[in-house]
Image (spheres, rainbow, N blue to C red):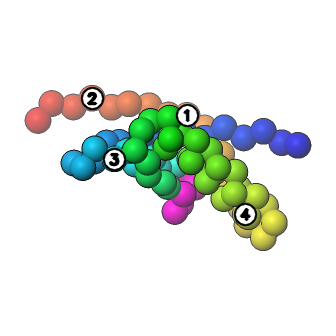
Amino acid sequence: MTEYEFTVIIEKDEDGRYIAVCPALQGCYTEGTSINEVSKLMKDAIHLHVEDRIACEEPFYQEVDTMKIKISV
């Protein structure tokens, strides 16, 4: 079994719901009412997404690095 690690971005929308997105896996996102819920749902979504790509022999990219960029406007 191979282990993979992905970055997930969690944001809170204007209605108070949490949105989670995995930038490395196009179309892999979910939402929930708490950080704990959205984290669990995202883990499941990533697992299913990667399983499906492997089964279909579709490539997916592994992250090399992440960074935060601060700007002033």
Q: Which residue is mark 1?
A: 65
Q: Residue at x 55, y 34 (%)?
A: 65
- Of circles 3 and 1, which is in front? 3
Structural crowding at the residue carrying mark 1, measured as other residues with C-alpha within 10 Å and reported as few (<14), some (14–19) or many (≥20): few
Q: Which residue is mark 4?
A: 53
- The span shown in magenta is 24-28
Q: Earlier in the sequence, mark 3 or mark 4?
A: 3
Q: Earlier in the sequence, mark 2 or mark 4?
A: 4
The three-letter amino acid code for the residue at tag 2 is: Lys
Residue 61 seen anywhere in this rendered image of the structure: no
Query: Please, is residue 45 above or below residue 35 in the view?
Result: below
The single residue placed furthest to the bottom in the displayed view is: 56
The three-letter amino acid code for the residue at tag 4 is: Arg
The single residue placed furthest to the right in the displayed view is: 1
Q: Could you give the CA–CA distance between mark 2 and mark 3, rounded to whole angstroms?
A: 25 Å
- Of circles 1 and 4, which is in front? 4
Compared across the picture, whether 19 is left or right of 66 comes to left
Q: Residue at x 78, y 70 (%)?
A: 56
Q: Residue at x 61, y 54 (%)?
A: 45
- Of circles 2 and 3, which is in front? 3
Q: Secondary structure at mark 3?
A: loop
Q: Secondary structure at mark 4?
A: helix
Name the image quarter holding the C terminus.
top left
Q: Residue at x 40, y 44 (%)?
A: 33
Q: Earlier in the sequence, mark 2 or mark 1?
A: 1
- Of circles 2 and 4, which is in front? 4
Q: Main secondary structure of the magenta part?
A: loop
Name the image quarter holding the N terminus.
top right
